[in-house]
């Protein structure tokens, strides 16, 4: 699978870190682009973002990367975390960076674009921008953890969101918690 992973300046670098750790960069072609603000937030939140071997890193303003062209075939793009400022720029069709141009290309080519906003609360402007992206075909997956799996650590909580992202990309994760119907009759004697 060919993937673009991007990050913007919203809080939530742990989501990016855990996602990168759970995608096998030997089995998948993974490209990473981070905004300048994402790098600042990462330094504040995790000291040093650990980028796994095999992940190709690109500068935010390098418009010579393959994923900014519709002729380059990529399977999915995930923006995690996605600030509401970036979400709004994507909704307006702005393409003045590699990250924004890639998102624009994924929408116009009807490829999977997953945006993971982490900001709260939302204003009406934020909500309207989210609706615009949904209407354009993006998947908006807010970083809202679940607790069915009874997470025991911050990483466990973060993983509940990362598993949803991996499900949307179509990558298997055997560790992902799956809801079971406890009310179903037991088929064992």
Image: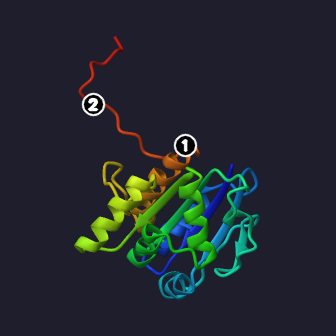
On the question of residue 176 being in view, the answer is: yes
Is 181 located above or below residue 22 in the figure? above
Q: What is the C-alpha distance between the residues marked 2 and 1? A: 20 Å
Around disc 2, counting alpha carbons within 10 Å, would you say few (fewer than 14), some (14 to 19), or many (20 or more)?
A: few
Q: Are marks 2 and 1 in contact (CB under 8 Å)?
A: no
Name the foreground residue: 5 vs 148: 5
x then y, percent, for residue 21: 61, 62
- Give how far across and how far down residue 46 sits, in percent: 52, 81
In the rendered image, the quadrant that contains the C terminus is top left
- Any part of residue 144 in sight: no
* Residue with the mark numbered 2: 182
| In-front residue for pair 45/31 | 31
Residue 45 placement (x, y as % from top left): 47, 83
Q: Secondary structure at mark 2?
A: loop
Q: Is disc 1 surrounded by few (<14), some (14 to 19) or many (20+) residues within 10 Å?
A: few
Q: Residue at x 41, y 60 (%)?
A: 133
- Comes first in the chain, label 2 or label 1: 1
């Amino acid at each position: 699978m060919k993937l673009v992973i991007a990050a913007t300046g919203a809080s939530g670098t742990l989501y990016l870190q855990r996602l990168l750790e759970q995608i096998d960069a030997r089995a998948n072609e993974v490209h990473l682009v981070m905004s300048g603000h994402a790098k600042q937030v990462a330094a504040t939140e995790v000291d040093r973002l650990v980028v796994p071997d095999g992940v190709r890193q690109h500068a935010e303003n390098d418009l010579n990367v393959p994923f900014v062209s519709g002729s380059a075939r990529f399977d999915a793009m995930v923006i995690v975390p996605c600030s509401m400022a970036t979400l709004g720029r994507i909704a307006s069709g702005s393409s003045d960076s590699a990250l924004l141009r890639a998102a624009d290309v994924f929408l116009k080519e009807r490829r999977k674009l997953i945006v993971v906003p982490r900001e709260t609360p939302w204003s009406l402007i934020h909500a309207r921008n989210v609706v615009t992206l949904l209407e354009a075909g993006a998947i908006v997956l807010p970083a809202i953890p679940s607790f069915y799996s009874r997470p025991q650590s911050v990483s466990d909580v973060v993983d509940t969101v990362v598993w949803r992202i991996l499900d949307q990309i179509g990558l298997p994760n055997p560790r992902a918690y799956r809801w079971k119907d406890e009310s179903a009759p037991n088929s064992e004697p």
